[in-house]
Amino acid sequence: MFKALRVGALALTGLMLAGAQGVSAGQLHLNPSAVVELFTSQGCSSCPPADAFLAELQGREDLVTLAYHVDYWDYIGWPDSFATKEHSDRQRAYAASWGSARVYTPQLIVNGTDGVVGSHRDEAMAAIGRAALPLPVSLTVTPKNMLKIKIDPQAGLPDAYVWLVTYVDRADVAIERGENEGETIAYTQIVTGRQLLGMWEAAAGTVLKMPLDEVLTAPNTGVAILVQEETDGLPGPMLGAALLQP
């Protein structure tokens, strides 16, 4: 039904676009209720239904969707052209945070807390339906194309890390070997990089700035901002998110 691998254990909602002379708005996901992360592989025969499901979710303005291609199935005959060790490590870190030594594809994780088989639509939709992000994230793009991220203080929440994630919104891949040999598969929201921007402090809030031109370089087509708890180096619940695709 799905591919699994045993591994060793490892030790917003609001988005505002202003001063838009520097960028023309394409997709702005306002008031997202969930960050949906799919761990997938081009070499996994059970992944295409989950990839297609993510493509359907991609256009929902209440979601931030991201696809992390893992590299641990590359040995079976087709090296995934988007896979990185860092993506596999992120999935293993999620597993470790839940006290598990097992990762599999396709896996869909909602708000850093609910993990389901990515092709099990009913379970996935139930997890998405339960999801909520308590922390508003404001984005402003200035006339000089500076991205300003503003997250106000909010009592009752833990401090969290602020990540910038770059992605490619779509790529069609002709697969020549392995379990999906002969198939051309459309992939969406393909993560190309993650960058730690800083900390959000619940008592003080935070403001971060960076040149948008420096992150939206080819092949990247969009950015997502994720605010996520972390304990002992392992990812925890998502608190807030925003997505911008000019």
Image (cartoon, rainbow, N blue to C red):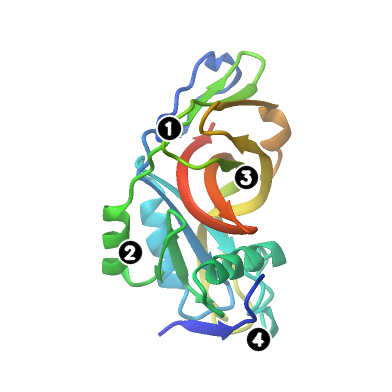
Which residue is the site of mark 4? 76
- Helix, strand or loop at mark 1: loop
Which residue is the site of mark 1? 155
Question: Disc 2 and disc 1: Cα gap in Å?
Answer: 30 Å
Q: Is residue 51 visible?
A: no
Dots 2, 1 in contact, CB < 8 A:
no
- In the displayed orientation, state which residue is furthest to the right: 214
Judging depth in this view, the residue of 162 and 169 nearest the camera is 162
Question: Disc 4 and disc 1: Cα gap in Å?
Answer: 49 Å
- Tell me which label, 3 or 4, sits earlier in the chain: 4
Amino acid identity at mark 3: Thr
- Tell me which label, 3 or 2, sits earlier in the chain: 2
The 10 Å Cα crowd at callout 4, few under 14, some 14 to 19, many 20 or more, is: few
Which residue is the site of mark 3? 166
Which residue is the site of mark 2? 124
Image coords of residue 123 (percent x, y): 29, 68
Question: Disc 3 and disc 4: Cα gap in Å?
Answer: 28 Å
Question: Disc 1 and disc 3: Cα gap in Å?
Answer: 29 Å
Eyeballing the image, is 229 above or below 95?
above
- Helix, strand or loop at mark 4: helix
- Of the 4 image quadrants, the one containing the C terminus is top right
The label number, if any, that marks residue 81 in the structure image = none
Between marks 4 and 1 in the image, the one whose residue lies nearer the viewer: 1
Dots 4, 1 in contact, CB < 8 A:
no
